[in-house]
Amino acid sequence: MNTPKRPSPPNALSVAGIDPSGGAGIFADLKAFSALGAYGTGVVAALTAQNTQGVTGVHAVPPPFVRLQLDTLFADVRIDAAKVGMLGTAAIAIAVAEGLAPPISAGRLPHLVVDPVMVAKSGDTLLGREAIATLIEALLPLATVLTPNLPEAGVLLDARPADNLKEMQRAAERLRRLLRDDGRRFVLLKGGHLAGDATDLLFDGDRMVELSAPRVATRNTHGTGCTLSAAIAALLAHGIEPVAAVRQAKQYLTEALRQADRLDVGSGHGPVHHFHAWWPRA
């Protein structure tokens, strides 16, 4: 008797930096992919020396080697969704855009989530100003979902960050114009820097969806942006449509924040609990 073959898990890719403390970057993304049932792969764009208190050094990977990693991976592995996080320099941003564009245009990379990582939770700068224009021109047009927080949105728009919901709506509309207008592409503007509930806006050019969750009282918020964008990518890789993927990713992150104090990692901004649904309580 032949046993029906189970469908394989989707494959997700993180293109980002390495955070040795495991709370952000590729290490965090791989945890989120795994927690949400996607097989994780990674292309390293930068190395950092950092912990939960701050960043003490950044070492950029040579752009040709970043491109080589991408080309070699796509030559062998089916990638169902990818996310781009910390890149660091304009040259790396170009290498990543040039490496991702061919599989996107050929339909071999259905979804790309772009998290424009510019500043660490500690306040350390992670993206040079010369790279911002390259990010806008080369990578944003490839995105299925763009996930800036309010300070990052201000940098992308060369404007003061929004400080209320009405200004967030206007910023989301302006950010959406940075994406291609060929199908459903989304801006997820994260409002966690405002007071009150954590309210985000999801805008596809026509519909503005408000997503709110109670603010979680914890200092363990390191890597929240990385984790959210990776969760969105993992869910898109499963074939979930973007609005539902964003909703489910936000629910996953909210619970990871609620359970973050179960971890004991560092004395600064610790990580969220990526495996809250899997690891037993003490």
Image (cartoon, grey):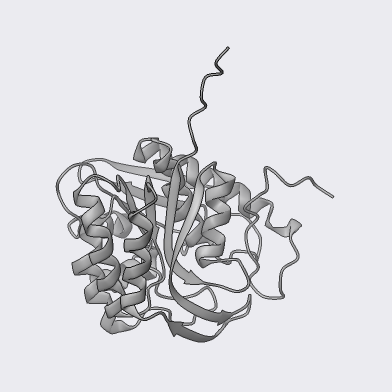
Q: Residue furthest left?
A: 181
| x 25%, y 40%: residue | 207
Residue 36, placed above or below residue 219? above
Which quarter of the picture shows residue 60?
bottom left
Q: Residue furthest bottom?
A: 56
Camera sees residue 173: no
| x 47%, y 56%: residue | 41
In screen coordinates, is 57 left or right of 153? Answer: right
Q: Across the whole image, how many numbered discs are drawn on residues? A: 0
In screen coordinates, is 267 left or right of 114? Answer: right
Where residue 264 appears, as percent x and y from the top left, is 76, 65
Residue 145, placed above or below residue 51? above
| x 27%, y 63%: residue | 99
Name the quadrant of the N terminus: top right
Which quarter of the picture shows residue 63?
bottom left
For the residue pair 89 and 104, the one nearer the viewer reads as 104
Camera sees residue 119: yes
In screen coordinates, is 127 left or right of 39? Answer: left
| x 26%, y 70%: residue | 135
Residue 117, placed above or below residue 164? below
Where residue 93 appears, as percent x and y from the top left, is 29, 72
For the residue pair 237 and 189, the one nearer the viewer reads as 237
Where residue 242 appears, as percent x and y from the top left, is 35, 40
Q: Residue furthest front?
A: 1
Q: Residue furthest right?
A: 282
